[in-house]
Amino acid sequence: MGKKLINDPEKVVQEMIEGIVMASNQRLEKLDGYNIIVRKDAPIEKVALISGGGSGHEPAHAAYVGEGMLDAAVAGDVFTSPTPDAIFEAVKAVDSGNGVLLIIKNYTGDLMNFEMAAEMAEAEGIEVDQVVVNDDVAVEDSLYTTGRRGVAGTVFVHKIAGAKSAQGAALKEVKRTAEKVIKNVRTKGVAINPCQLPAAEKSTFSLAEDEMEMGIGIHGESGTEKMKIKKVDQIVDSLLEDILTDLKVKSDDRVALMVNGMGGTPLMELYIANRRANQILENKGIEISKNYVGEFMTSLEMEGLSLTILKLDEDLIDLLTAETEINLLK
Amino acid sequence: MARKAKELFIKTADIIIENKNYLTELDAAIGDGDHGVNLARGFNKLKEKLKAESFESRSELFKLTAMTLISNVGGASGPLYGTAFLNISKVISENELSLDDLIDISEEAIAGIQKRGKAEAGEKTMLDTIIPAAESLKNSRANNLDLNTALNNCLQAAAEGMENTIEMQATKGRASYLGERSIGHQDPGATSAYLMIKTFIENSLK
C-alpha cells in the first residue's frame, strides 16, 4: 500500500473541502452536511454555474468557484460522481431565479446523477440546463460507445461560460457559449506512473519502469496504449498531432494552449513540454493567444501531463481574458 | 412479510460489504477501481437505517433502499441500482411472491436501469447478469416449472450471464474507454448484480 498524507480514507473529501474554505479568505463556504463549495455571496443576480464530479482532480472544481467562473462545485468521493441530492442542494443554494447551468464531464455516472438532480430541480420549478464536456481525443467518438471523456478542457468551459454569465447573459446564451467552447476544445494525456485511491490497496494500473501509457483519462483508468517511454519532445509531438488533426487547426488560427500536470509531475517537466508545444505551434503558423502551464485538472498523484488546445475567435478571446478573481485563469 | 424482507436486505448488504475488495479489484482492471468501495459505503448506510427503523410494507422498504443507495453510492451504480429498487417499490406485492410477481419485478428493475444507463444486453454491464436471469424466469413460466426450480434456474442463468461478460467488449460505462482491452475481464457491475440476485434467491428457496 502506498503512502498518503491523510487521516482517514473515508474523510478525505470532507476534510479537504473544509481546508479549501479556510484558505479562501472568506470568499467561499461549505454547505452544511454536504461536500459542496459555494460562493459566499451566492445567490447572485445572474445565471448560476455549477460543476462537479468526483474528487481527486484538484484544483478542479472547487478552486474555480468565484467571481467570473463557477457559483458552486459539488465534490463526490474520490473519482466518484456526487449524488443527486447533493447536486440538487447546490442548485437551490445558487439559483437566483435566473436559471442554473450544470457543467458536466462526460462520464456515465456524472451524467446520471446530474440528470436526476435536474429532474428534482425542475420539479421544484427551478430552470436548469446542462452542457456535457467531452474533450478527450484519446477516446473514439462513436454513437455506440459512452463517447469521449471530459478532462482538462472543462476548465475553459468554466472560464468562458463564467465570463458570459457575469456579463448578464440569459441561460440560453450562456449555454450556447459553453457549447461553443466544447466544440472547439480538445485534450490528450499521457502517464508515466499511475495513482492510487486513498481507500484502495493497489494502484489503478501498473506500468513497468520503462513504460508509459498514452491516452490516459483523469481517473487512473488505463489509457489506450502502453509503450516504451520516450523523450518528452516526442511525446508532445504525438499528443499535439492527434489534437490538431482532430480539431482541424490550420495556420493563422488562434488558440489557447494548456499544459496540465496530472498531480505528480514536476513543474520543470511541464515547462519543458510547454517549450516543445510552443515550437510546434509556431512552426505551423498557429498563434498562441493564451498559454497556461500548471495543475488544472489532476488525477491524484498520477505522474503525467495533458495538452489542451482551444480554438479561439474574437468572442472567445474576450471571454477567456475577461476579469476573474480565480488566479489560475487570470 | 416486510420483516423477512428486511432481514434479506441486511444479508444482501453484508454480502456486498464482504465482497468490497473483490469488486474493487475487478473494477481496477477495467474501470477506476471504486465499485466495491462505493457500494459498500451505500450498503453500510442502508444497514444502519434498516436496523434503526421498522417497516409496514415491502414497498416502503424498497423505497428506502433506493433512496439510500441513490444518495450514498454515487458513481453510476448509485443511480442504476437506486432506480431499479425504486421501480420495484412501485409494483412489489405485499403477499407471498409468485413467479409472475418475480417476472414483473425483474422487468421493472431492467426498465429502471435502462432508463438511466441506456444500455442493452451484451454491452458488458450489470444488465448482462439481470437480463438472462429475467429471461430464465420467463422460460420457467412458459414451461410450467415450480417456483423452486425456477429460482434455481434463474440463479444459474445469472451466474452464466456474469461469466459471459468476461468475453465481452465493453461499449457502455468507463470500461468502454479500453475498447478491446476490456475483453478478458469479468464486469464488476455484472458481479455485484449477481451477488444480490444470489442472496435474494438463496434466502427465498424453500
Image (cartoon, rainbow, N blue to C red):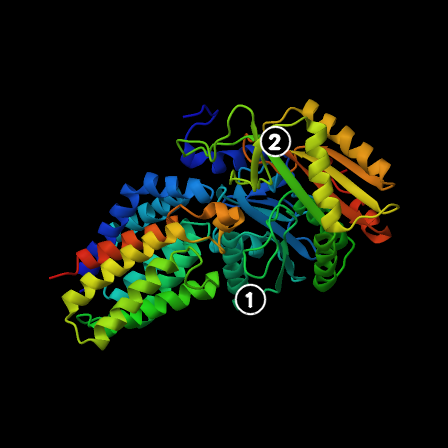
- Return the residue at label 1: A122
Mark 2 secondary-structure assignment: strand
Q: Residue at x 38, y 50 (%)?
A: B166
Left or right: A271 as drawn, with respect to B103: right
Q: Is residue A66 above or below residue B204?
A: above
Q: Quadrant of residue A231?
A: top right
Mark 1 or mark 2: name the one nearer the start of the chain: 1
> In front of the other: label 1 or label 2?
2
The spot of residue B202 in percent (x, y) is: 18, 56
Q: Is residue A14 above or below residue B50?
A: above
Q: Amino acid at mark 1?
A: Glu
- Return the residue at label 2: A304
Q: Is residue A36 above or below residue B157?
A: above
Q: Residue at x 55, y 31 (%)?
A: A302
Q: Residue at x 74, y 62 (%)?
A: A173
Query: A102 or B18: nearer the eye?
Result: B18
In the rendered image, the quadrant that contains the N terminus of chain B is bottom left
Query: B104 or A247: nearer the eye?
Result: A247
